[in-house]
Structure formats: C-alpha cells, structure tokens
Amino acid sequence: MKIIIKNGRVIDPGSGKDGFMDILIEDDRIASVAQGIPVVEGEGVIDAGGLLVLPGLIDMHVHFREPGREDVETIIGGSEVAAKSGFTSVCTMPNTNPVIDNQALVRFIKLEAEKGPINVFPVATITKGLKGEEISEMGELINAGAVAFSDDGMPIESSILMRRALEYSRMFGVPLLTHSEDLELSADGIMNEGINIDFTASSIDISY
C-alpha cells in the first residue's frame, strides 16, 4: 500500500530538510521526500496543509505511574497517549512505588512496553530506594534494560556518593539525569533575594 502525505511543512533535523514537501510511503517505509510527488490512482492521500510533518519525537522525562499507581496511569495507557501526540520513544522516570532500583522492575517495564505502540526506555534510580545513601546496582540494572540513572526530584546531597555514581556511569557509558539542588540552601528560600518593589500599591514601596 502507498500513502502520500501532501502539503505539509517537512522538518527533519537529521537531513537538514525544512520546507513544504510531499512524502511517499510504501510498505510502511518512507520511499521519497520531494516537492510535487504525483498521486497515482489507488494511493491514499493525507492532506497535511497547515501542519508540521516531523520525525517521531523523543521525551527524555515522563512519569508513567506503573508499577504501583495503575489507577493513575499504566505503561500502555501512557504509551498510547504519547503515540497520539507524536512521540515514538520515551524515558520513564524511576520514582514509582516501588521505585525502579532492581532488575525485576526494569524487566517488567520492558515487557509491558512491548505490548504498546512506542519505545519505552526505563531509567533506574541512582541510589537504592531514592534514599541517597547507597548506589544502585548499575551493572545489573543496565543488563536488565535501564538506559540511564536518576533520582528524579531527589538531589544527591553527598558529594562522595555523587562522584562514585559518576565514575560508575562512565564505566558503563550511560548518563546520569540529576536534580541539581542543595536542599539546605533552598529550604524556606525565596526566588529573588534583593530589592522588592510593590507595583500594585498606590505608592511604590522599596524594601530589602
């Protein structure tokens, strides 16, 4: 079966394309990208006028709530929403309940994702239980299918533990996705520490 997507603005950073072109699809593969591809009788036509035509998008930070909170969202449910939104690959954060800090849960995510329409890449925790005390078994987690490590919204406050985590991740050639925050510094803090000007008052009050 042949399908032509016509009249859309094709943007492909990989090949440097950015312009109004047609796309010919044959047997579920892109056969040609060019202007003015003729329509042959029997071919399906999708009018993409006024739309962008892009390669599949990748989201590096999603929160599918399975395992543990399937009442909120499942891996399959999140995958279907992602596919309808133009995303073909996502990386799932590990702050589920239970957290993704062992091989069994990484494999569970991989197996569930195989039933869905997109690529789901599990991110495992940097530290066991997201506690910031002990590094997860990175080698085992990578063997199970983890592609990166993150404690998500929990910063690694121990400098020596963070160094060890970076050393291990470098050995395995995988990235760490970190939440860079010093909780002692940010606790009870304000966004702007300086002059405060109240523009809503009848008279301007400048104070420190």
Image (cartoon, rainbow, N blue to C red):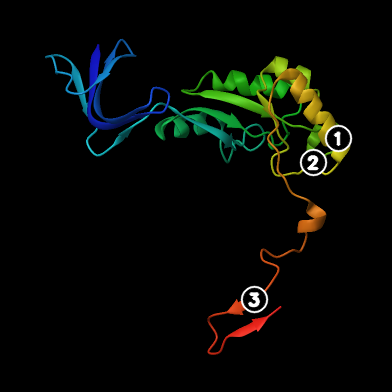
The image quarter containing residue 37 is top left
Q: Where is residue 178 in the image (x, y as percent from the top left)?
A: 71, 39
Residue 135 appears anywhere in the view? no
On residue 188, which mark appears? none
**Cα separation between marks 1 and 2:** 8 Å
Badge 1 or badge 2: first in the primary sequence: 2
What is the crowding at mark 1: few (fewer than 14 residues within 10 Å), some, or many (at least 20)? Answer: some
Q: Mark 2 points at which residue?
A: 156
Helix, strand or loop under label 2? loop
Q: In this view, does 155 lie above or below 101?
A: below
Q: Would residue 53 be found to the left or right of residue 105 on screen?
A: left
Residue positioned most to the bottom: 203
Q: Residue at x 37, y 30 (%)?
A: 54
- Observer-nearest of 135 and 106: 135
- Observer-nearest of 202 and 76: 202
Question: Where the C terminus falls, by quadrant?
Answer: bottom right
What is the crowding at mark 2: few (fewer than 14 residues within 10 Å), some, or many (at least 20)? Answer: many
Q: Where is residue 34 in the image (x, y as percent from the top left)?
A: 24, 21
User: Given the image, on which type of amino acid does mark 1 rest?
Assistant: Leu
Q: Name the residue under label 3.
A: 196
